[in-house]
Image (cartoon, helix red, strand yellow):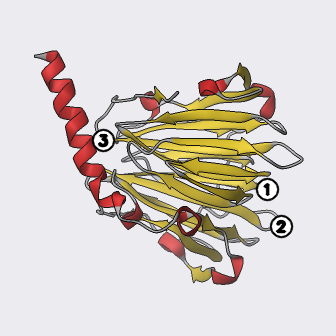
Amino acid sequence: MKSLVNTLLVLSSLLLALPSMAREPLPERIASTDPGAYRVGSGAHQGAGEIHYDTLIPGSAFTTNFNFVHRGFLPPGGGIGHHFHNQMEEMYFILDGEAEFTINGRTSTIKGPAAVPCRMGDSHAILNVTDKPVQWMNIAVTTRKGIYDNFDLGDDRVGAAQDKVPVFVNARFDKSLLQPMPGLHGGTGTAFYRRALNPDVFFTNWSYVDHLVLPEGVTVGKKRHANVEEIYYIQSGAGMITVNDETAPISKDDALVIPLNDVHSIANTGDSDLQILIIGAVTQKWMLDTIEME
């Protein structure tokens, strides 16, 4: 019975992946950050000041319940007001700079590069109180595909009291925390890797956030996931990414969806570290898998 259930789950994931078979060439699927395309919003969730952002990857690009990837910056004094979601989880990434985060009414300063998961039902806000723009990204996963909900609390968090040590989940993307991984997935050289957030953190089918650094000349070998869809976001550096039988250059502030069952690998072809955030969502909670390809 167990083997039959597993077979059905694999077949289901294959069926889900069918729509992605007819798609644009790989270079056209790589989303590049374009500050010139940012929209300017004010009073986001009744927050302070402005936010500047664009949709880097829309929900229609995903098979799983990823809902969007937003990329932009918070100007000085800008933020997103205190609010919560009952059907969705999101995560605010500080790529550069620092900001005040509030989770469930408790506020602390978080210095980037770092991320704070805003779990389903947890109220949250972000505010830039510095005199420099904060480079920012937001990713969301829903309980039901395409469903967005929010409840605003009418609080911009300006002047909120702070805890010296955050009393909420957060993750720093610090190279000193990475572990050496020689020949990762059959690749060449030594990669450096850490699972910054694991499935226990999330209530939805959001499954993990990984931090991966490839020194010059290092590669990660071919693999695929039958039940995991991933987002690759390039924090720094440049390289070549291969998906199935296509290869394309990818560089700082680019993002790419790796659909279910797509065979993928990546190589650092630049002259500095290639630093990558890998965000995964699953078709069913806890259904993690990695299949290495020869």
The residue beneath circle 2 is 132
Tell me the crowding category of disc 1: few under 14, some 14 to 19, or many 20 or more residues within 10 angstroms, Cα based. some
The kind of secondary structure element at disc 1 is loop
Amino acid type, label 1: Gly
Q: Quadrant of residue 261?
A: top left
First in residue order: circle 2 vs circle 3:
2
- What's the mark number on residue 283? 3
Could you say where residue 257 lies in the image, as x and y percent from the top left?
Answer: 49, 55
- What's the mark number on residue 97? 1
Could you say where residue 141 lies in the image, as x and y percent from the top left?
Answer: 39, 52
Image label count: 3
Q: Residue at x 89, y 47 (%)?
A: 271
Image marks 1 and 2: residues in contact by CB distance under 8 Å: yes
Amino acid type, label 3: Thr
First in residue order: circle 1 vs circle 2:
1
Amino acid type, label 2: Lys
Q: Quadrant of residue 40?
A: bottom right
Image marks 2 and 3: residues in contact by CB distance under 8 Å: no
**Foreground of the two, 99 or 282:** 282
Give me the C-alpha separation between circle 1 and circle 2: 8 Å
Instruction: Let me know if residue 59 appears in the view.
Output: yes
First in residue order: circle 1 vs circle 3:
1
Instruction: Let me know if residue 128 appears in the view.
Output: no
From the viewer's perspective, is residue 171 above or below residue 290?
Answer: below
Could you say where residue 182 lies in the image, as x and y percent from the top left?
Answer: 72, 20
Give me the C-alpha separation between circle 2 and circle 3: 39 Å
Q: Residue at x 69, y 58 (%)?
A: 249
